């Protein structure tokens, strides 16, 4: 009996002791779950997954079995089991409350354009975890926005940047390091340091363009991927899949490409910016006959759509055509030698 009383006293004393900061951290810390913890994933399979660029559970959970089998050189049945297990362990299969989603939205970062009118139009800047489509006629400034955001992405977080790396898929040979140098100097940045964080690849056809997205996935384990630019998105698809007979095939491939890009944005908490070409509708009786390429597939895949057009005096007009949470609107800015300005 005395022993029991002593234990009771000891317990009550321990309960009264304040928890140290380390003890609180130990309680809150959850063990890090890796791909090796998935059922049926041994060292050899884990190595194949990592070589294919799948380092995180979320990256596996959002894959289709056939796609994972092809990229990681695994059987489709094995891939299906791995994906199902990743979905359970990543806890993405069920419904979540709006409150939980609001909390998750706090992870979203915004990249400033360093142009007050554009930032105001977009509610503070270009959002991560989103796919932003910029379309307009030739000379409207689509590539200029891509170059400017690439420069701004290297800036520190406190200055509205992401302090991250940029991957630029160039389909029309429009990337110019000289322009990056001008824009970097316009904001007082070291051009060599900025260019060192921009990784450019020239895509020679649609298959190569899609393959480059897989390369970014693999490289994301060594780089802080925060901005992916495709300039322009439909160029190769439009040239290779000609006529109504090829329309379904083109749209299917384009849809797959867009899903891969959106997955990159979600997994890396990054921003994807794609530029798009336009065509004119001669049968339009009223309104602007200029329409973006890509049809409904691209329209539905884009989180934000910006329509650019020229104005008098060297000015440009950006119109927010579509957004999940912002009203339509327009802003005016100009393209100078030092970059985009109000």
Image (cartoon, rainbow, N blue to C red):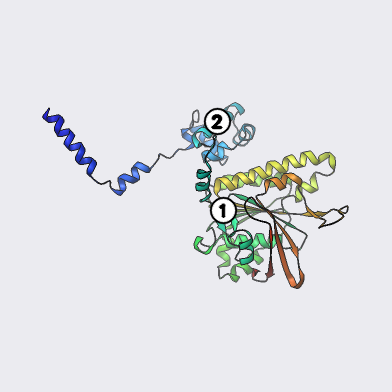
Q: Residue at x 56, y 53 (%)?
A: 226
Looking at the rendering, which quadrant does residue 227 occupy?
bottom right
The answer to which of 289 and 255 lies nearer the viewer is 289
Tell me the element at label 1: strand
Specify few, some or many for label 2: CA neighbours under 10 Å numbering under 14, 14-19, or 20 or more.
Answer: some
Residue for badge 1: 226
Asked if residue 115 shows in the view, the reply is no
Q: CA distance from mark 2 to mark 1?
A: 28 Å
Residue 102, how many percent across, how many down? Answer: 52, 47
Q: Quadrant of the N terminus?
A: top left
28 with respect to 256 (left or right): left
Labels 2 and 1: the sequence-earlier one: 2
Q: Residue at x 72, y 66 (%)?
A: 316
Residue 32, how many percent across, how many down? Answer: 43, 40
Tell me the element at label 2: helix
25 with respect to 137 (left or right): left
Residue 18: assigned label: none
> Mark 2–mark 1 contact, CB under 8 Å?
no
Residue 15, how many percent across, how many down? Answer: 24, 40
Specify few, some or many for label 1: CA neighbours under 10 Å numbering under 14, 14-19, or 20 or more.
Answer: many
Asked if residue 90 shows in the view, the reply is yes
The answer to which of 283 and 26 lies nearer the viewer is 283
Residue for badge 2: 84
């Amino acid at each position: 009996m005395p022993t029991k009383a002593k234990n009771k006293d000891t317990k009550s004393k321990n309960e009264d002791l304040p928890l140290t900061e380390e003890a609180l951290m130990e309680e809150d810390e959850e063990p890090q779950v890796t791909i090796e913890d998935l059922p049926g994933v041994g060292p050899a399979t884990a190595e194949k997954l990592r070589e294919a660029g799948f380092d995180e559970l979320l990256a596996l959970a959002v894959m289709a079995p056939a796609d994972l089998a092809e990229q990681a050189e695994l059987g489709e049945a094995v891939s299906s089991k791995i994906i199902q297990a990743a979905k359970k362990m990543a806890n993405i299969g069920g419904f979540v409350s709006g409150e939980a989603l609001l909390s998750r939205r706090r992870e979203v970062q915004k990249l400033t354009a360093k142009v007050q009118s554009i930032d105001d139009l977009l509610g503070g800047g270009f959002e991560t975890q989103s796919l932003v489509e910029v379309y307009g006629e030739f000379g409207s400034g689509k590539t200029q926005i891509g170059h400017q955001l690439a420069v701004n992405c290297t800036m520190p977080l406190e200055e509205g940047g992401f302090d991250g790396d940029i991957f630029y898929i160039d389909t029309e040979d429009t990337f110019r390091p000289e322009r990056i140098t001008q824009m970097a100097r316009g904001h007082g940045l070291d051009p060599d340091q900025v260019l060192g964080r921009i990784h450019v690849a020239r895509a020679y056809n649609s298959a190569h363009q899609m393959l480059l997205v897989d390369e970014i996935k693999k490289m994301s384990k060594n780089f802080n991927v925060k901005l992916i630019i495709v300039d322009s998105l439909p160029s190769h698809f439009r040239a290779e899949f000609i006529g109504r007979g090829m329309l379904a095939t083109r749209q299917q491939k384009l849809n797959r490409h867009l899903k891969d890009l959106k997955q990159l944005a979600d997994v890396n908490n990054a921003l994807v910016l794609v530029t798009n070409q336009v065509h004119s509708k001669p049968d339009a009786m009223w309104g602007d006959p200029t329409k973006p390429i890509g049809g409904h597939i691209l329209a539905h895949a884009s989180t934000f759509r910006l329509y650019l057009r020229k104005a008098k005096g060297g000015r440009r007009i950006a119109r927010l055509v579509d957004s999940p949470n912002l009203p339509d609107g327009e802003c005016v800015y100009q393209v100078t030698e030092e970059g985009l300005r109000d």
